[in-house]
Image (spheres, helix red, strand yellow):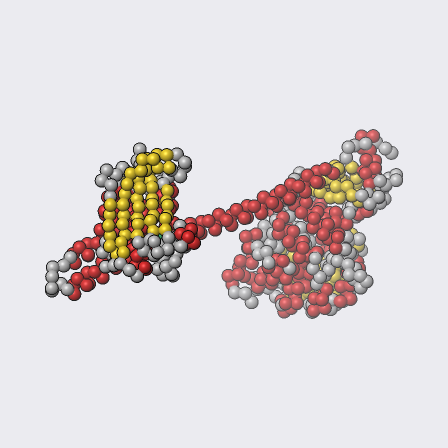
């Protein structure tokens, strides 16, 4: 366990926010290209029953980018170390880890390293490998697609359009969004984001999947362009103690587009014994 | 229904459900992507390249879902014939609705322009990195030279101090036999110590970027006062001679700096004599030069200092490098190799010239010429 100085530093580095009246910790980790604001429709629903912890990965939101280390964050393991350091700093155990997209894999890596910390993993739109490896594995993309994405990201981050800057301009039609979130939402450092994207899209963590012992829920969306159903099903077969649940929600961000269904499924999974199927609900 | 301003807008317009099912698209967009009649009912995903689709889902979709507008994102449309069209995309998902509205502008040439800008930016960033690195290196070098310079000057002065103390010791031994000049030796040692203090002041002034004060200096005075410093430090095999022009013109310089110049040249000369293993002579002379050819090519009045020795002399190879910083043949711990580089630096700062004339076995003549004060 890291000593207290770096532990405290982890809380600043990852802009860790803690709320809620429960005791069991529920740690929400955002996906690529966003920050903890992503959980604003879902996390508050658990504040009554849990101790809700949210964080920003380095380079996202209000994280401290001065703590950025290019080689540490060259692989998802560096991000998993951040998760474990945050857990240590808050002295968390019995953690329900909820990770979206790339965070699902980061959570699995963290749980392999320190299984004693985690009670359950909730994996929203997970994928251990985005590349196709025919015939056995269909990640959804070929190498050209992923290189094209990295190229597209670079164009959007650094181009004359600077598209990601205009993108974060507030929408005057939605004044209900809080000021605090306006300021931080998806403030992503372009260089770090590019590096993160490489770590995410060009890695293959399939061999790590069978090493996870923590019970987990695979939340598979319909028509998910990033993590197709073939990937969710592959995970269901290879991830020990996992429960597979197909959402009615479409897309890659059910916690944003279909928060009610997401909350419901999460609640039911947490209420049932580990490994039991989640009873489908009328969404 | 077709609506002319909508269908013929100079932009691609499209509305779709949040699930990506196209509700309507204007004729312009249909024409761009070369679909036959209409796009209604098609999937948004079929209009985007895989990379653009990924980017849309991972980066833009969450923003729209959180009520943000997307302004000017860059994506690529996938046409029927396999062609790709770069477009700028604005998108909005009105509150409470389950539709997304988009407008697109073609930016074909912009993309190339963009790419060249990005390349220029990368190049500029790289150049900055290189510049910063070399500026750091230069600074380190300057600091190192400064430190070595202090060490060097102290080394010279300590040579003088040590020589005088040696002398005093020998004279103490024979003190009972004859009257001695112990007092003089100690005076010289004391003087060298004071000089060392001066140099520190001088170098501190230099690091503080203060301008070295220049005044009218008579080189004869410099030589005379320097001779007090090192005459005893030479050892018995080196004799010392001066031939000074009584009507010597003044120069504009720092007296301290000139003292360093003379000291360095004379110590080099006496080293060369001692190294030759024979008794020898070091001679310092001064003269006025009426038609001196300056380094700039003009002729002017100059004042010349010549230090001659009949020591080892230098091979062409050594004399070619003698001025280089840190070049020394005297071995580690003996020479820093900065003496002549400091002389050269000081002399060229004053617009003067330095000429070394040397051959193995034939001794060395070093000529410093400086502009007459005007
Ligand atoms: N009068 C001379 N006769 C022969 N060689 C000389 C003479 N003056 C300079 N040199 C050669 O040039 C080299 C460089 O001289 P320089 O004064 O720069 O450094 P140094 O004398 O070696 O060390 P220091 O820094 O202690 O002066 C010397 O090491 C020596 O080889
Ligand atoms: Mg020297």
Nearer to me, A3 or B228: B228
Residue drawn at 21 percent across, 54 percent down: B188
**Residue B157: which quarter of the image?**
bottom left
Q: Is residue A150 left or right of residue B224?
A: right
Residue farthest along the front direction in this orientation: B362
Could you say where residue B2 lies in the image, as x and y percent from the top left? 86, 33
Could you say where residue B241 lies in the image, as x and y percent from the top left? 24, 50
Residue drawn at 27 percent across, 50 percent down: B283
**Residue A238: which quarter of the image?**
bottom right
In this figure, what is the number of numbered marks? 0
Q: Is residue B135 above or below residue A25?
A: above
Q: Is residue A238 above or below residue B201?
A: below
Nearer to me, B311 or B271: B311
Whether residue A91 is visible:
yes
Residue drawn at 71 percent across, 40 percent down: B111
Q: Is residue A34 left or right of residue B35?
A: left
Q: Can you say which quadrant of the picture contains the C terminus of chain A?
A: bottom right
Can you tell me which quadrant of the image ligand 1 is in? bottom left
Could you say where residue A34 lies in the image, as x and y percent from the top left? 66, 50
Nearer to me, B106 or A38: B106
Residue drawn at 63 percent across, 48 percent down: A190
Whether residue B161 is visible:
no
Q: Is residue A183 above or below residue A227?
A: above
Nearer to me, A213 or B9: B9
Residue farthest along the right direction in this orientation: B37
Residue farthest along the top direction in this orientation: B4
Q: Can you say which quadrant of the picture contains the N terminus of chain A?
A: bottom right
Could you say where residue A153 lies in the image, as x and y percent from the top left? 68, 48
């Amino acid at each position: 366990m890291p000593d207290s100085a770096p532990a405290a530093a982890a809380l600043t580095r990852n802009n860790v926010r803690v709320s809620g009246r429960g005791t069991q910790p529920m740690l929400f980790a955002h996906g690529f290209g966003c920050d903890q604001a992503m959980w604003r429709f879902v996390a508050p629903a658990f504040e009554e029953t849990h101790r809700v912890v949210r964080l920003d990965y380095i380079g996202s939101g209000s994280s401290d980018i001065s703590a950025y280390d290019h080689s540490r964050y060259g692989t998802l393991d560096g991000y998993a170390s951040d998760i474990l350091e945050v857990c240590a700093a808050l002295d968390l155990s019995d953690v329900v880890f909820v990770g979206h997209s790339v965070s699902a894999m980061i959570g699995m890596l963290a749980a392999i390293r320190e299984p004693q910390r985690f009670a359950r993993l909730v994996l929203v739109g997970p994928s251990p490998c985005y590349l196709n490896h025919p015939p056995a594995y269909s990640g959804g993309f070929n190498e050209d697609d992923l290189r094209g994405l990295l190229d597209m990201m670079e164009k959007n981050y650094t181009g004359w359009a600077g598209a990601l800057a205009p993108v974060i301009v507030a929408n005057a039609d939605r004044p209900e969004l809080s000021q605090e979130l306006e300021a931080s939402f998806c403030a992503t450092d372009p260089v770090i984001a590019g590096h993160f994207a490489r770590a995410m899209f060009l890695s293959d963590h399939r061999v790590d999947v069978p090493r996870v012992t923590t019970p987990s829920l695979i939340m598979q969306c319909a028509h998910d362009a990033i993590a197709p159903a073939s990937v969710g099903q592959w995970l269901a077969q290879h991830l020990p103690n996992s429960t597979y649940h197909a959402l009615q929600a479409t897309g890659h961000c059910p916690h944003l587009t279909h928060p009610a269904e997401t909350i419901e499924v999460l609640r039911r999974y947490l209420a049932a014994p580990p490994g039991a199927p989640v009873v489908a609900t009328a969404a | 229904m077709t609506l002319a301003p909508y269908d013929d807008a100079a932009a691609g317009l499209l509305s779709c459900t949040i699930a990506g099912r196209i509700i309507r698209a204007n004729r312009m967009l249909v024409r761009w992507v070369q679909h036959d009649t209409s796009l209604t009912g098609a999937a948004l995903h079929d209009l985007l390249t895989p990379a653009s689709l990924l980017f849309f889902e991972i980066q833009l979709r969450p923003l729209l879902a959180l009520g943000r507008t997307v302004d000017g994102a860059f994506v690529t449309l996938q046409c029927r014939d396999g062609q790709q069209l770069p477009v700028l995309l604005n998108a909005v998902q009105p509150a409470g609705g389950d539709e997304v509205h988009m407008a697109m502008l073609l930016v074909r040439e912009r993309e190339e322009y963009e790419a060249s800008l990005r390349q220029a930016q990368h190049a500029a960033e790289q150049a900055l990195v290189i510049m910063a690195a070399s500026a750091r290196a230069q600074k380190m070098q300057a600091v190192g030279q400064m430190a070595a310079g202090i060490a060097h000057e102290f080394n010279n002065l300590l040579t003088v101090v040590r020589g005088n103390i040696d002398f005093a010791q020998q004279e103490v031994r024979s003190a009972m036999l004859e009257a001695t000049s112990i007092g003089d030796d100690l005076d010289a040692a004391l003087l060298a110590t004071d000089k060392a203090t001066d140099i520190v002041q001088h170098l501190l002034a230099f690091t503080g970027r203060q301008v070295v004060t220049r005044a009218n200096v008579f080189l004869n005075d410099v030589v005379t006062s320097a001779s007090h410093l090192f005459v005893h430090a030479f050892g018995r095999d080196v004799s010392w001679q001066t031939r000074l022009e009584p009507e010597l013109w003044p120069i504009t310089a720092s007296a301290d700096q000139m003292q360093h110049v003379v000291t360095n040249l004379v110590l080099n000369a006496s080293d060369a004599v001692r190294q030759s293993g024979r008794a020898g002579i070091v001679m310092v002379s001064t003269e006025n030069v009426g038609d001196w050819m300056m380094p700039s090519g003009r002729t002017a009045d100059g004042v010349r200092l010549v230090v001659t020795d009949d020591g080892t002399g230098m091979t062409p190879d050594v004399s070619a490098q003698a001025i280089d910083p840190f070049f020394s043949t005297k071995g580690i711990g003996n020479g820093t190799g900065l003496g002549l580089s400091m002389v050269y630096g000081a002399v060229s700062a004053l617009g003067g010239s330095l000429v070394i004339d040397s051959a193995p076995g034939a001794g060395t003549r070093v000529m410093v010429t400086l502009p007459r004060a005007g």
